[in-house]
Image (cartoon, rainbow, N blue to C red):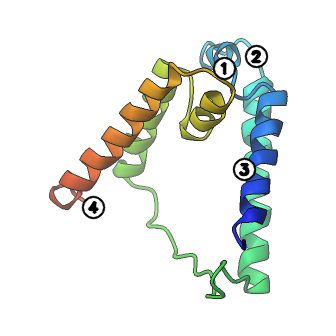
């Protein structure tokens, strides 16, 4: 029953992303063609929201669902791995027209062919888990 509030927030988030057309393949295509500011504006709002949210979590010592304090570890300074990871993520996003969050929204909206994209995302995550110890971290 504790998880219901998180399900409701997820549902609300899905509705907002759908209504602002952030899950639209056409909007994503426009973004990667530098034809529209629409998606860049949404991304900037998300970044600002994340910054504010992290500051609230750090300063108010917010606890997780189980009552444990949320600890945010410092990231390593700029590194090649972040550039490579971002490049792979961006290429995947450009090729399929959806980043991981909207995959679930699109399936929920009835676009069942996106299930193939979800399968690829899960497979890629699994394969990373298999080889991550062999990668330079």
For disc 3, the marked residue is: 47
Q: Residue at x 60, y 41 (%)?
A: 101
Marks 4 and 1, how far apart at CA: 31 Å
For disc 1, the marked residue is: 31
Report the side of 6 relative to 123 (left or right). right
Q: Of callouts 2 and 1, which one flags the residue occurring earlier in the amino acid sequence?
A: 1
Q: Of callouts 2 and 3, which one flags the residue occurring earlier in the amino acid sequence?
A: 2
Q: Which mark is residue 36?
A: 2
Q: Quadrant of the C terminus?
A: bottom left
Are the residues tagged 2 and 3 within 8 Å (C-beta)? no
Are the residues tagged 4 and 1 within 8 Å (C-beta)? no
Res. 89 in view: yes
Are the residues tagged 3 and 1 within 8 Å (C-beta)? no
* Percent x, y of residue 56: 79, 74
Does dot 4 land on a helix, a strand or a loop?
Answer: loop
For disc 4, the marked residue is: 137
């Amino acid at each position: 029953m504790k998880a219901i509030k998180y399900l409701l927030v997820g549902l609300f988030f899905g509705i907002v992303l759908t209504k602002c057309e952030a899950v639209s393949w056409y909007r994503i295509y426009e973004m990667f063609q530098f034809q529209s500011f629409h998606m860049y504006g949404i991304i900037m709002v998300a970044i600002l929201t994340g910054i504010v949210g992290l500051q609230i979590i750090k300063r108010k010592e917010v606890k997780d669902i189980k009552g444990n304090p949320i600890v945010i570890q410092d990231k390593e300074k700029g590194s090649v791995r972040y550039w490579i990871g971002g490049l792979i993520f961006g290429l995947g996003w450009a090729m399929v027209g959806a980043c991981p969050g909207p995959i679930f929204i699109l399936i929920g909206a009835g676009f069942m062919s996106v299930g193939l994209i979800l399968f690829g995302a899960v497979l890629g995550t699994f394969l990373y888990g298999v080889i991550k110890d062999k990668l330079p971290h």
